[in-house]
Amino acid sequence: MRHAPPLVLLALTFGLAGCAQQEGEGVAGATASPPGGRPTLAAMAERLPATVAGFTRRDTTWHEQTRAGLGVAMDYDGPARSAVATVSVYDRGQADVPNDIDSAALQAEFTAAVSEAVAMAGTRTSQRIAERDRSDVEVPGQVPMRCATLHGTYGRQEVQTLVCLGPAAGRYLKILITSPARQVRPVSPMPFVVD
């Protein structure tokens, strides 16, 4: 995970790129999107790939059912479980997340996502992590995703976490990928973000 590989981001954002509401799509009732509106969370979750850049989709957690605005999170396992990833799609109660990575809303949400990842590590007695760098990852045909690379330790094991955030069909798309810094079978996280 020295340089976050764009293939994973690309794969996921391409999966979500097709999330524009299709005529007649959606379930009648509260979960349906208005014509021309953003797709439902269920539609977005369904369009995420089962496998991407060697990662396999596992559990889906519907946070929206208990706390409005928190959306849905999908977990992925890397090749030979050498890495883990979580993809979250949510809106924090905003009717339409701006489609501009430099907007105040996306900048604030990105800062919160990085802070949350660092703080979460701080709650574990054997884990320490700090931000190393930030970059924007170009996603063909989409708005770029902003990413931060975090480095630290989990016990004696050096770990790296890639935190990426961008807009997707009127919602936030957040991707977290964590793996050991030194792996028997190296995993490059950027293909997960870009594919």
Image: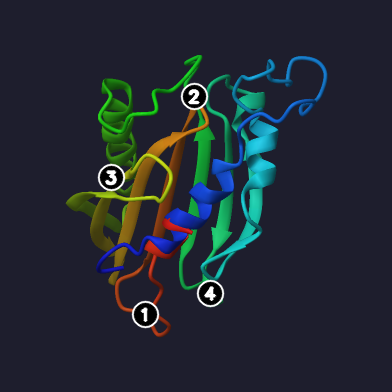
Q: CA distance from mark 2 to mark 3?
A: 21 Å
> Callout 3 environment at 10 Å: few (<14), some (14 to 19), or many (20+)?
many
Look at mark 2 in the image and give the residue it sits on: 91
Q: Residue at x 24, y 60 (%)?
A: 152
Residue at the image point whose x is 30% and y is 57% from the top: 127
> Which numbered disc, 3 or 1, marks the residue that appears first in the sequence?
3
Measured in 3D between alpha carbons, the distance from the residue under mark 1 to the one under mark 4, in whole angstroms, is: 11 Å
Q: Residues within 10 Å of mark 1 (few under 14, many from 20)?
A: few
**How dense is the environment of label 2, judged by Cα within 10 Å: few (below 14), some, or many (20 and up)?**
many
Q: Name the mark nearer the viewer: 1 or 4.
A: 4
Quick one: SS at disc 4? helix
Residue lying at the far right in this picture: please name it: 28
Specify the amino acid type for callout 1.
Gln
Q: Secondary structure at mark 2?
A: loop
Tell me whether circle 2 and circle 1 mark residues in contact (CB < 8 Å): no
- Mark 4: few/some/many CA within 10 Å (<14, 14-19, 20+): some
Expressed as whole percent of the image width and height from the top left, the position of residue 61 reads 63, 40
Callout 1: SS: loop
Residue type, mark 3 in image: Val
| Residue position marked by numbered label 1 in the rendering | 183
Lower position in the chain sequence, tag 1 or tag 4: 4
Q: Which comes before the other along the chain, label 2 or label 3? A: 2
Q: Looking at this rendering, what residue extends furthest in the bottom direction? A: 184
Relative to residue 124, is residue 9 drawn left or right? right
| Image depth: mark 2 or mark 1 in front | 2
Which circle, 3 or 1, is nearer the viewer?
1
